Each structure stands twice: as C-alpha cells, then as structure tokens.
Amino acid sequence: MGARMEIIDFETISVDTVGREAIHAIALGGLDYGDTLRAAIVKTGPFTSLILNHVGSVGGIQRFCITSQRQRTVDVRIFGAKVRFVEIQADIEKPLPGFPLVGLPEDGLSPKAAWTKSGFKVLAKGLREHTGAFQVMTGTGPKIIVPNRFAEEFRKHENANLCQTFGQDFFAGWRGFDGITFLTKHERTFSLGLVADAIVNEARVSIFNIFETPKEWLEIQLKDKIGELVARLSSRAFLGEELCRNPKWLQIAQKHTMDIVLWPIAYWLNPFTARLRRQIEKHKERVQQALAAGKKPEKGSDALGWMVMQAGGRDIDYAAGQLGMSVVGIHTTTEALSEAIVDLCNNPDLFEPLRSEIVEVVQKEGWSRAALYQMKLMDSFLKESQRMHPSSAVTVNRLLLGNIRLSDGTMLPKGARMFIAGRFFDPTLYPDPDKFDAYRFLQARSQDGQSNNWQHTSMTPEHLGFGYGDHGCPGRFFASAELKIALSFLLLHYDWQLPDLQDNLFMTFGVATILSPKCRVSFRVRRAEIEL
C-alpha cells in the first residue's frame, strides 16, 4: 500500500552538492514494513522546487533521486506516512584541494571507475609517480592514500577515527547495519583456549557431515562447502553447540554475510533484510521480557557470554552484534580458507610438509594454544596466502577528526578520509614478490629478534593484512586459530586438487582480491595419520 501524500513531519538539512548533478535522499525510520513513500519536494531556492523520484524502499528505508541540482545546498521536506526524519547523503565526486588525483584517463575511465575496475593499477601508478600523499576517487568519495612509511604515525593517533568512517563507507547508522557499529566500538578478544576446544569439537562432528567420505574424486564448488564449514565452526564459538547446528541460524548467518556485501543494493531490493529485522525484533522482545522478570544471563565461554560481559549492564543490541560477528568472521574466514586450499592445489609439494607438521604438533601438544603456535609452517603459509591475495591493498581506513601534519610537513585536513598503502608486492621488501613462497615468513621469523614480527597475526607496517594500530583486527587471533584447525582437518582427512585449468580463479574489485565463487576443486577422503 502506498503512503498518503500529506505532511507528517520534516527536517531541514543542508548538504554540499557542488560538482554533482544528482544526490540521493534517504528517509530512515518510522514507516511500517511495506509502506512506500512516493515523493518528496526539494526546495532549492526562494522560487524553485524539484520533485524527488522514488527509487525504492525496504523495511522503512526510502530512496529518492533528483535529476537536476545546481545549488550549493538544498532544503528537504519529506511528504509521506509517519516519517520522523531525513538523512541526505551527497554522492560527491569533488576532489580534495591540495592533493594530486590519480586515475587512468589514458584508459578512458573516470577517476571513480578507474579505482573500481583497476584499483591495483591506480595505486601502483600513484605510488610510482608521487613520493608523498595523493588521492583517489572511491565509490564513496575522495580518499587520501598515505605512503606506508608514515604508518607508525597513525598507530595511536587520536584524530584518526575508524568508527565514523565505517558510518560513511558501510552505512553503519542504518537500521540492519547495527552490528557493524557494535563491533568497531568493542574489543573482541575472549578465551582463545576455550574457543579452540569448541572449534575442534565441532570440526570433528561437522567435517564429515559437510564433505562426507567420497572414495573417488568428487568435484565441488569450493566456497559453498567451505562457507558451510566456517559458519558452523564460527557459530560454535559465537553461540554455542545448540545454535551452531541449527539450520535456521546457519541460513541467517550465511545469508546475512553474503547479502551485506551487496550494499546498498540488497538493502533496497532484497526483502530478506525486512524479514530478518522482524525476526530480530521478535527475539529481542523475549530477551527484554526475561530481563524484566529479573532473570540474569549465565556467564558463558562463547561470544554471546563475552558480549554480556562487554555490555556491563548497558542496553546493547545482542542480535545486531551477533550478525556483525557473522559478517566479519564468516565471510573473511571463508575467503581465507578457500584461498588457502587453492594455493595448496597450485603448490602440491606443500601437502606433505604441512601434514607432517600437523601430526607432529598435535601428537605432542594436543589442541592447546601451544600447538597452534608450534604450527609455524602453516602459520607462514597462511600469511603468504594473505599477502598474495590481500583483502585490501590499502588499510588503516580512517576519518580525520582534526588536522594531522605528517613528518614530511604534509597537512591532512580535518574531515578527509584516508588509507595507508600496503607493501604486499614491494620487491625491496619481498624478493620475487609475485611468487608464492610458503616458507617466506618462516625464514623471516628465524632471524635474530624477528620471531614475533612475522607471525600470521602480527601487525606491522610491512604486512598490513590485519590492519595496524589501535583499530587493527582484534579478531585476528580467533581467525588464525580457526583457520589452522579447519585446515588441519581438511588436510588430514582429504586429498585436494584442481580438476582442470580454470581461468580467472581470482578476481579483483578496487584493491581487494577474492577467489571466484565459481572456483571448483576435486577432493576425496583419505586415512588420517592420527585422530584429531
């Protein structure tokens, strides 16, 4: 049912639209599910008004588009049903003054299109042509690329903020994206020993349920199966034994993880998000009723228990937090584990050394934290896989809350957003950088005083796989433990190979590398040397 065209409420907001002929107006909150706000009036001056065309809505979120706008600011008045407030997001492609804009005009691409389609090429060009900071035009506006040598200056800088840049890049303030906000504000470290035990126990149950025991080579779409495994292992740590095997929860966790990558398209077009929010609200009511009755949550070793402790009695959204953990935990670990399997298939001489290390360590240490630390070849292998397929070639994504002057005198202005450039393929740091070398970081750790600098979980300017500084990935210890456990089970219980030559196994988006969802591998069961 469409909303009636009458004024309910409005709020006037000004937004800079210089350099653009379109803006997007988004009205949040207040509408019932299924309601559609048909139009709004944009007042651009004393005598001029424009109609915003309705683009779409899901779950009370409305989107409009103006086809022509040349004024510096606009006043927005929304007409519709039960609308409480309006947010304007200006999709501006206005470069920042004082920083060279790097693109690929020679390829006939706009700066934004160049970054989206050929981000690695744009980054390499910028670093080659400029010794200092430069800017690129991303899908969410201009960002300054700061050379890697300045990374240490941002490790603890109070004016370099992660949470607020998430609000712009990942729509963290929108309903349904609450989990992203929660996870950027809270430390995510809980008992690794207890979590490792839980993951091992779940791996023993789920590995054969998911992959079964084919005696002949069986071809599968890799990421589908790995995603199932990671969802179960992660959910065991996040929510405990019962829910990690609940088909409905696993569907929610995986679906939410994959759909959120399509921001904001899925938000407008996929009714799953509306259904999901209804489910969340229903279960939140049960929690509130229990708390009102004086019931107290039990202290647990899973992530839900950790969230209760982090809350400290505050009213937080546990469902949003769990969905956020699914986003940052399931998707990224699925990607890393899938890429590791393909790297092994492309380097089959690594199967036996890795299996030998697993057998030796587990026989000696069991599944203790010491065991995970002693898997040094696997640790080096995973770090090399991460280097070769970075989730982003730039990191330390920050919004500047104040001016920051670099040591070379460059002034980064308040309000700008920035990245630190990685050195993943720098030949001065990594000899033969395009070659996969599983022993690269094992050898680096053997050097005097370097044993802690080149571990899989280490955060250094030389390898920004998990970020750097105060807002580096706090879940990296959990992720590394989960990867080592899962890979151990997959290697000891199965043989793996690529069935035939497949083109474009790896895909790039901007400066991110992912394994193609269509990648197929063959596997068959094998007799494990020991019982894991």
Image: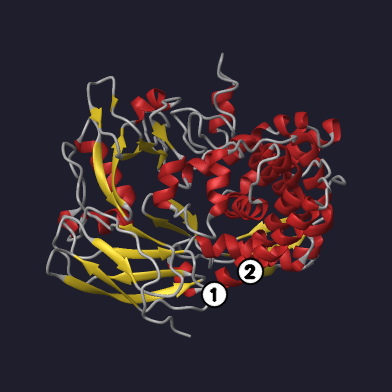
Is residue 360 depicted above or below 210 in this figure? above
Q: Quadrant of residue 132?
A: top left
- Note whether 490 is above or below 165 in the view shown: below
Q: Which image quadrant is residue 39 in?
A: bottom left
Mark number displayed over residue 84:
none
Residue 14: x, y in percent? 25, 54
Quarter of the image with the C terminus in it: top right
Residue 89 place in picture, x, y as percent: 33, 57
Observer-nearest of 405 and 280? 280
Q: Are marks 1 and 2 in contact (CB under 8 Å)?
A: yes
Q: Amino acid at mark 2?
A: Arg
Give the colour scheme shown.
secondary structure
- Which residue is drawn at the image coordinates 30% and 39% (left, top)? 415
Using residue 419 as the reference point, say whether residue 258 is left or right of it: right
Which of the two labelled residues, at mark 1 and mark 2, occupies the earlier sequence position? 1
Viewer-proximal residue among 357 and 155: 155
Provide residue 290's location: percent of width, then percent of height.
Answer: 80, 54
Residue carrying label 1: 33
Q: Residue sitting at 26 percent across and 72 percent down?
A: 41
Q: Splitting the image into 4 quarters, where does residue 484 fall?
A: top right
Q: Residues within 10 Å of mark 1 (few under 14, many from 20)?
A: some
Assign a secondary structure to mark 2. helix
Outermost residue on the right side: it is 531
Q: Does the rendering let one see residue 236?
A: yes
Q: Amino acid at mark 1?
A: Tyr
Say whether residue 491 is left or right of residue 506.
right
Spatial CA span between label 1 and label 2:
9 Å
Q: Determine crowd level at label 2: few under 14, some 14-19, many 20+ residues with C-alpha closer than 10 A.
A: some
Question: How many badges with numbers are in the image?
Answer: 2
Q: Residue furthest top?
A: 448
Q: Nearer the viewer, residue 440 or 201?
A: 201
The dot on residue 278 is 2
